[in-house]
Amino acid sequence: MNVMFQYSKTSSRFRIARLPLAIAKPVKRGLAVARHRFDAIEIRDRKLARFLCKVIPVQCPFERDIKFLGRTLAHIPPLCKLNPFYDQLAYLRFRALCYLVEQCGESV
């Protein structure tokens, strides 16, 4: 399903609209190329591995429980699954951690 969000000027809300097929196919190809490049990154340096572990979060930073007086009023779900590169970034962080443990002998 080719979907994009559009802002409606009259109702001040976002609405979901389908992307035209002429736009959707190149976007999908571009995302596939970017995913392939993330998967092709080789970790051969301790500095790069540490940098990736610091930059890529362990869990979604947007997930929150909104509490008031000890009661949970609302829960904001993790938004990371909306990121088209979430799986590639998580795997890249995992490979960086493995490199640090196996090759460098660091405990993480």
Image (cartoon, rainbow, N blue to C red):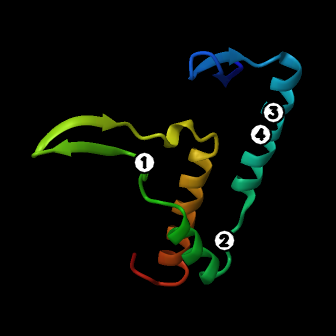
- Front in this rendered view, residue 21 or 33: 21
For the residues labelled 1 and 2, say whether their Cβ atoms are less than 8 Å apart: no
- The mark nearer the N terminus, 2 or 4, is 4
The residues bearing labels 3 and 4 have C-alpha atoms spaced at a distance of 9 Å
When the figure is inspected, residue 95 is found, relative to residue 104, above or below; the finding is above
Q: Which mark is residue 43?
A: 2
When the figure is inspected, residue 18 is found, relative to residue 61, above or below; the finding is above
Could you tell me which residue is drawn at 82 percent across and 40 percent down?
30
Question: Tag 3's secondary structure?
Answer: helix
Nearer the camera: disc 1 or disc 4: 1
The residues bearing labels 1 and 3 have C-alpha atoms spaced at a distance of 26 Å
Place residue 9 in its image quadrant: top right
Left or right, 38 with respect to 23, comes to: left
The residues bearing labels 1 and 2 have C-alpha atoms spaced at a distance of 28 Å
Residue for badge 4: 32
- Front in this rendered view, residue 104 or 79: 79
Q: Residues within 10 Å of mark 4 (few under 14, many from 20)?
A: some
Nearer the camera: disc 2 or disc 4: 4
Could you tell me which residue is drawn at 60 percent across and 82 percent down?
46
When the figure is inspected, residue 55 is found, relative to residue 90, above or below; the finding is below
Q: Residues within 10 Å of mark 2 (few under 14, many from 20)?
A: some
Residue for badge 3: 27
Residue for badge 1: 62
For the residues labelled 2 and 4, say whether their Cβ atoms are less than 8 Å apart: no
Left or right, 12 with respect to 7, comes to: left
Question: Tag 4's secondary structure?
Answer: helix
Question: Tag 1's secondary structure?
Answer: loop
